[in-house]
Image (spheres, rainbow, N blue to C red):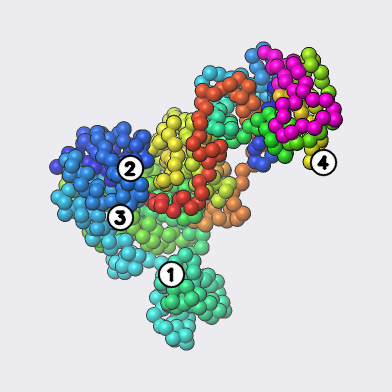
């Protein structure tokens, strides 16, 4: 699963990997509990807790005595500093279509490349799944917010 | 005999007093404004009375309505807490005129200590040291300069020139040496004249690296007036205390005795009754000078309670009831530290913050006391003071108290509203705080360009992972729809109607 967060003016990509019950990222592992806490496992065998709550679009995380406010960037949300999701972030032209309907894709995989405002924008899968349909071909004009392709998440 | 106490306050201090009433077997009445309808303090009172209106002038500062509420509910005493009406002599008088018991000192004592100039005169007469200073009455330029030169000989250098009529730093000059005096005095007088239409200045000794040390006093109506030792509150930001401790790290028993005697003399000079605090500046050479007297219970009173074992609010109730205080000999043991938890952004010039308390999980365990007026699920609004709680620790030594405070702050989880917890935690590692060499301008000196927080990459990675896992697995149990948008920081313009006790 790929997520994007904004913290302190920077944008961070988080690509989680999943083994049966444990999520991993940057050599740390996490196991969510049902009480709003998450158990953290470090490489060296030590453990810690993180507390988490969502207010609006912001995840508030308490870990190691510090509080982090991480604003979640919705996949496909219009933003000039991120790569976009499955809808066109702005009006433009499709440069390349990298997948076809029926194809399996991984979270983080580039599906399509758009050119808009003289810049290239990658359309990236936010989660692993199956491409069910592709709505545009290379060379097509797209309007802002146009649905570019559909991906059905695998469970 | 007091049987029912109306608490003319809100939030944390109202909770503190209402609990003391419950413990003393007294029934209690709270007053509240509409926007405090869900306030925790209401739950701690036997009944509560709504004061209509949107402004604090109509509610917590509405003396007539508060006295009426006391009469309507059969309350026989009023406790003002701190802030709001606690130091308004005319309110104290009105309470007494209405036949109610005022839990505090006499209106005369409040008035005498409330006026800075009259307090200074009374203290001088009582033999309490005041900051050496001379008022320059001369209007004529040449005569004034002559008087300033003579005054400077008396106070010594460095000295401070202040506009007699002024405030807000206008007409204020620091003069480090005699050869700077002429220029400094001329520009201070010019600035004072331009700003206030009054060029008179005041020459005062400037105390470098001084500590803010205050002495708790207690006086009853049976002729006893004692001090309960000192608190040090040097760590301040924007003249607001954030970190308070008892005892003062550099205190000696002989200095405590001298400061204690001065505080008792100050209280006696105004026939003080009840709990009060005499604030001093303590210079590096152990000389100390009267600043002001707070004629009420103070925010930081718990640290004194921790090291003396005295329940100050219970003593206030006892004394107001005409009983002798129950305090025996002063016996200070251990060390206590209090930090003030504010809803504010320490990385943005301490701008007050608002938002929901989506998670509010205070620390527990040995030596920890939390005085608060909020709980999980409450909303922090811009209507009142942004202080959420006071976290107080007690331990056998100062070093252990600091260790306990670090642990407690690390455990404290507040999500949904920006707080100064991280800033307070960083303060605990500042060398001056660790060694006890704190002084009033320390925070300004430590962070000349403002406090910043840079997380360790590992901690940020864990936070990012946590948020991503929570998002993926739909941990929306603790999710709160904010009425104020995402990360709430109040506009500074909304804070103007607040009173900071």
Q: Which residue is mark 1?
A: B166
The mark nearer the N terminus, 3 or 1, is 3
Query: Compared with residue B212, is residue B377 higher up or lower down, i.e. above or below?
Result: above
In the structure shown, which secondary structural element does the residue marked by tag 1 occupy?
A: loop
Front residue of B295 and B224 = B295
Magenta range is A127-155
Quadrant hosting residue B332? top left
Residue at image position (77%, 32%) is: A142
Residue B234's x, y, as percent?
Answer: 47, 53
**What numbered label is drawn on residue B87?**
3
Q: Residue at x 23, y 37 (%)?
A: B28
User: Disc 2 vs disc 1: which is toward the camera?
Assistant: 2
Pointer 2: what residue?
B33
Discs 2, 3: same chain: yes
- The answer to whether mark 2 and mark 3 are in CB contact below 8 A is no
Foreground mark, 2 or 4? 4
Query: Which residue is more in the foreground, B442 or B372?
Result: B372
- Alpha-carbon span between mark 2 and mark 4: 57 Å
Q: Chain of mark 2?
A: B
Quote the CA–CA distance across marks 2 and 1. 35 Å
Is the residue B99 above or below the residue B128 in the image? Answer: above
Report the residue marked by disc 4: A118
């Amino acid at each position: 699963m790929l997520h994007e967060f904004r913290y302190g003016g920077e944008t961070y990509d988080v690509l989680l990997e999943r083994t049966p019950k444990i999520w991993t990222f940057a050599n740390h592992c996490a196991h969510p509990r049902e009480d709003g806490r998450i158990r953290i496992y470090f490489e060296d065998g030590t453990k810690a807790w993180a507390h988490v709550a969502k207010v609006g679009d912001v995840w508030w995380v308490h870990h190691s005595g510090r509080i982090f406010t991480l604003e979640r960037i919705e996949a496909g949300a219009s933003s000039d500093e991120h790569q976009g999701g499955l809808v066109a972030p702005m009006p433009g032209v499709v440069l390349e279509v990298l997948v076809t309907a029926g194809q399996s894709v991984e979270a983080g995989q580039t599906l399509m490349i758009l050119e808009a405002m003289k810049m290239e924008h990658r359309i990236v899968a936010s989660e692993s799944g199956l491409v069910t349909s592709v709505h545009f071909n290379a060379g097509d004009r797209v309007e802002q917010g146009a649905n570019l392709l559909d991906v059905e998440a695998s469970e | 005999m007091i049987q029912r106490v109306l608490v003319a306050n809100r939030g944390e201090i109202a909770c503190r007093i209402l609990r003391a009433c419950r413990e003393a077997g007294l029934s209690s009445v709270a007053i509240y404004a509409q926007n405090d309808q869900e306030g925790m303090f209401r739950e701690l009172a036997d009944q509560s009375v709504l004061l209509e209106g949107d402004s604090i002038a109509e509610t917590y500062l509405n003396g007539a309505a508060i006295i009426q509420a006391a009469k309507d509910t059969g309350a026989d005493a009023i406790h003002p807490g701190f802030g709001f009406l606690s130091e308004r002599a005319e309110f104290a008088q009105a309470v007494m005129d209405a036949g109610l018991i005022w839990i505090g000192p006499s209106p005369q004592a409040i008035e005498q200590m409330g006026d800075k100039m009259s307090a200074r005169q009374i203290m001088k007469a009582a033999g309490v040291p005041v900051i050496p200073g001379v008022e320059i009455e001369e209007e004529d330029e040449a005569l004034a300069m002559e008087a300033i030169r003579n005054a400077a000989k008396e106070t010594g250098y460095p000295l401070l020139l202040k506009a007699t009529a002024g405030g807000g730093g206008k007409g204020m000059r620091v003069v480090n040496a005699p050869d700077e005096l002429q220029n400094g005095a001329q520009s201070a007088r010019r600035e004072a004249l331009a700003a206030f239409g009054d060029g008179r200045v005041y020459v005062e000794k400037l105390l470098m690296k001084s500590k803010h040390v205050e002495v708790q006093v207690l006086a009853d109506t049976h002729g006893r007036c004692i001090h309960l030792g000192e608190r040090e509150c040097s760590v301040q930001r924007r003249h607001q205390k954030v970190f308070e401790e008892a005892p003062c790290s550099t205190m000696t028993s002989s200095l405590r005795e001298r400061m204690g005697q001065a505080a008792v003399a100050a209280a006696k000079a105004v026939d003080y009754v009840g709990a009060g605090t005499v604030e001093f500046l303590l210079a590096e050479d152990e000389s100390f000078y009267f600043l002001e007297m707070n004629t009420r219970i103070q925010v930081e009173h718990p640290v004194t309670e921790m090291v003396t074992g005295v329940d100050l609010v219970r003593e206030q109730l006892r004394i107001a009831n005409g009983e002798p205080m129950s305090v025996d000999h002063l016996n200070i043991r251990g060390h206590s530290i209090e930090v003030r938890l504010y809803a504010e952004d320490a990385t943005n010039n301490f701008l007050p913050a608002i938002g929901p308390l989506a998670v509010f999980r205070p620390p527990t365990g040995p030596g920890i006391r939390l005085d608060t007026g909020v709980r999980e699920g409450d909303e922090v609004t811009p209507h009142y003071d942004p202080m959420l709680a006071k976290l107080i620790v007690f331990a056998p030594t100062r070093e252990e108290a600091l260790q306990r405070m670090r642990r407690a702050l690390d455990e404290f989880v507040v999500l949904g509203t920006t707080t100064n917890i991280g800033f307070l935690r960083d303060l605990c590692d500042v060398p001056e705080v660790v060694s006890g060499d704190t002084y009033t301008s320390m925070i300004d000196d430590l962070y000349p360009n403002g406090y910043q927080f840079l997380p360790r990459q590992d901690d940020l990675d864990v936070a990012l992972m946590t948020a991503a896992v929570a998002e993926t697995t739909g941990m929306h149990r603790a999710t709160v729809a904010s009425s104020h948008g995402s990360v709430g920081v109040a506009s500074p313009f909304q804070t103007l109607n607040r009173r900071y006790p």
